[in-house]
Image (cartoon, helix red, strand yellow):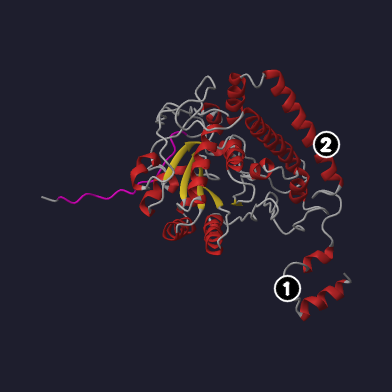
Amino acid sequence: MDHHHVQQLHIPEPKHRPGELADFSHLRLPKPGSVERPPIDTSAYDIRDLAYQLIRVLNEEGCATGPWTPSIDAETLKRGLRAMLLTRAYDERMYRMQRQGKTSFYMKCTGEEAVAAAQAFAFDRNDMFFPTYRQQGLLIARDWPILDMMCQVYSNSADRLKGRQMPVFYSSREAGFFSISGNLGTQISQAVGWAMASAYKGDTRIASGWVGDGATAEPDFHYALTAASVYHAPVVLNVVNNQWAISCYQGMAGGDESTFASRGIGYGIPALRVDGNDFLAVYAVTRWAAERARTNLGPTLIELFTYRAAAHSTSDDPGRYRPEDEGTKWPLGDPIERLKRHLIALGAWSDERHQATVAEVEAEVREVGKRAEELGTLEHGQGPELHTMFEDVLKDMPWNLRRQRQQLGV
């Protein structure tokens, strides 16, 4: 008898495609407040089950519940809400500007604002960030001027990066925001290396790096986890699982086989999985991981379970690979609405104050946007001066570049 079976290759497929009804009933979402909060010095082995759970704090009524409820005052929560609102308003304007031809490219973080805002608030101001291109909220939450960000997107005369980076590839040493790289995965290794250097020098600062779900399939991710584990690097490693890369869903990176947080288990790294649309939960989990790193207990891997509500970028048409209504069916809701509901439940906010704040941030973005456009856009105005192409490249300019500069008369 022949016991051999014809082999079949498994090709992951999303649950629904364009033209089909979006349905997230297959997701196993524990009740808010139901997941344990261990001490920060608990071993990775003893909390491995948390890599398969989902830490949640806010319930449907906007009330905080359970052991992960953070000690965070209402004024700080209001600042967090404003940072998210400002991020969304900034995104909306810059997206429109790209559509008007004033810049070549833009990427929104709609639906993911709590990831950056809450995490920025959970770290110390001097800690170092190694983000991807969807964490513009980190800069905004650290009060970095949106005028500077706009000028970078436009590559205009006030662009501190002098037109050398793609739009939205921000960089700010002063804000502890490392230069964004389009080669995804690099920043996670850089975060580990920076954290190792901080420990080696006896510094007090820690680092944090971000990747998307797709980049966890890249070698850089696994190199980073190995080094972080071996050297007990003071670093927080974040996987933003927003369900979709530019055109393929998270199952192509292994998300159907296990959680992305569970990848930390094999490296002996504590791994947590959190509702990425819950500001309080994201803050609490990040604070827990940061305290571990700061007290020389080593790295933590966090999976932020969220949803990319907008297109991957202005180069993308999500209607070609997912149902148009999928974002509205996402069961974890809108992070801004959820924090708004919580503040109202605390008696510290109201619909009227919310609408006034929305109008305020939109007016701010509109006014700053006019100033940025006066300094130049892709469409018109002055870009970086020609002589800047020779600057900040080599410490000592070689003879051939000096000659080229002289020939150009700059």
Q: Is residue 51 left or right of residue 337?
A: left
Q: Please, what is the dominant secondary structure of the magenta stretch?
A: loop
Quadrant (top left, top right, bottom left, bottom right) of the C terminus: bottom right
> Where residue 90 appears, x then y in whole percent?
72, 38
Range of magenta residues: 3-16
Is residue 393 a member of the stretch shown in magenta?
A: no
Q: Quadrant of residue 357?
A: top right
Q: CA distance from mark 1 to mark 2?
A: 39 Å
Q: Please name the residue shown 86% across and 71% down the image.
A: 408
Look at label 2 and name its amino acid.
Glu
315 or 128: nearer the viewer: 128
> Where residue 40 appears, x then y in whole percent?
44, 43
376 or 88: nearer the viewer: 88
Q: Is residue 45 left or right of residue 226?
A: left
Look at label 1 and name its amino acid.
Lys
The relative height of residue 186 versus residue 403 in the rendered view (above or below) is above
Q: Please name the residue shown 78% across and 69% down the image.
A: 390
Q: Neighbour class for label 2 at 10 Å: few (<14), some, many (≥20)?
A: few
Q: Please name the residue shown 57% across and 55% down the image.
A: 204
Which secondary structure, mark 2?
helix
The relative height of residue 173 versus residue 240 in the rendered view (above or below) is below
Residue at mark 1? 395
Q: Earlier in the sequence, mark 1 or mark 2?
A: 2
Q: Quadrant of residue 23?
A: top left
> Where residue 262 appears, x then y in whole percent?
39, 45
Q: Is residue 119 left or right of residue 86?
A: left
| Nearest-to-viewer mark from 1 and 2 | 1
Residue positioned most to the left = 1
Residue 367 bears which disc, if any?
Answer: 2
Residue positioned most to the right = 409
45 or 274: nearer the viewer: 45
